[in-house]
Amino acid sequence: MSSEYIWDKIASTQKHIVFYGTGDGADKIAVQIESLGKTMSGYFVSDDFYRPGKMFRGKEILTLSKAEDLFGDFLCIIAFGSRLENVLENIEKVRHLHETYIPDMPLCGSELFDKNFYEHNKEKHEMVRSILSDDVSRKTLDGIVKFRLTGNPDYLYGCQCSDDDYKNILDKKYTAYADLGAYTGDTLRRAINDYPSIKIAVCMEPSEKSFKKLAEYTNSFFEPDTIIVNAAAWDKEDTGHFIDSGGRGSKISNTTTNSLSGSKNRVVEYLPLDHVCEIHGEQLLIKYDVEGAEIKALKGSFNTILSNETDLEISVYHRSGDIFDIPLYVHELLPEHKLFMRKLSGVPAWDILLYATH
């Protein structure tokens, strides 16, 4: 695979480098490419998003046709993520016209999943393969690793599953549900619909805007008995900084600065699930989507997990090491649980889920 490494390809290209997409993610990728001694020739967006005169990193944002007029046969970098079918179709059209790569930058932290990172974590890769419970999971893990090293989305397309695949794994009659990173209540709604036996629900969401919508939703029904908390799930009681975009760009932050897109950096409360509720003896499902704080949130759920018949659904894509470190931690915590890994549709390697079932 050495000849396919994305960063080697970009470093050695003699073509103009042109980005499809702008924003925080594009800025991260641009900084990485500049560290290779390369510069970006331009940026373009889909025709529907084109606005004359708009700028990004000192250059006017173009349409694809304008970029082709200026730069000819360029190397294209896909600098955004999407699950929308029409957007994925646009990406495929660009791939047929130009040499194209999709860098997978960490959403949290600064450690890049490059070949050096992989060489240091190759043993973990094999360890995770050995504890996963089915061939689909192992194929998913391998496909994600190959994609992150090469930037070739074909490796992702070969291991993606449907949005409903979790129903083949989480098939119990849950009586309690904890939603860490509850957003506006979309996953709570899904859980209640899928498991009408749920009688207790606990939701944690640090985003101010999302929490208001979550409160509006939970106020609209009487069952299940629901606790909602405007805080980030953590391993201890604390406060800290949080980039609050009201969506995917939200994350725990180590700085006091706002994001490039202008999302506000707020001080929020950090709380362990164990301090938020007392749930005992239930068939419990806990969902973790906490923007890079998954292991800390797991540690803060320790007593709740062990006090119930608990299954877990965990996002394992925010940090470069999550795909290895989280399965290994969960296996150490719950050695008798079966572990399954699934990747939902879309690019880059986001929406990767680990399921732990007893």
Image (spheres, helix red, strand yellow):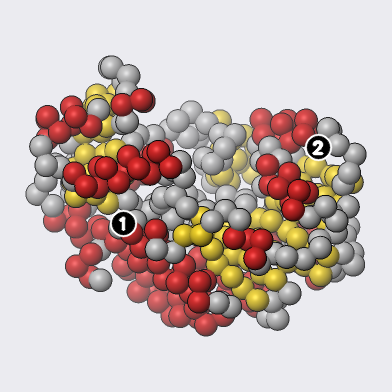
- Residue assigned mark 1: 151
Residue at the spot 35% in from the left edge and 34% down from the top edge:
22
Q: Position of residue 172 (x, y in %)?
A: 77, 66
Residue at the spot 25% in from the left edge and 42% down from the top edge:
94
**Numbered mark located on residue 304 in the image:** none
Q: In this view of the protein, can residue 275 be seen by the observer?
A: no
Q: Position of residue 227 (x, y in %)?
A: 84, 44
In the image, 92 versus 230, the foreground residue is 92
Task: Using the image, determine if residue 103 lies above or below residue 205.
Answer: below
Task: Using the image, determine if residue 258 lies above or below residue 231.
Answer: above
In the image, 202 versus 46, the foreground residue is 46
Residue at the spot 85% in from the left edge and 56% down from the top edge:
197
- Residue assigned mark 2: 218
Task: Using the image, determine if residue 151 lies above or below residue 183.
Answer: below
Picture quadrant of residue 185 = top right
Q: Position of residue 183 (x, y in %)?
A: 66, 41
Task: Using the image, determine if residue 355 lies above or below residue 273.
Answer: below
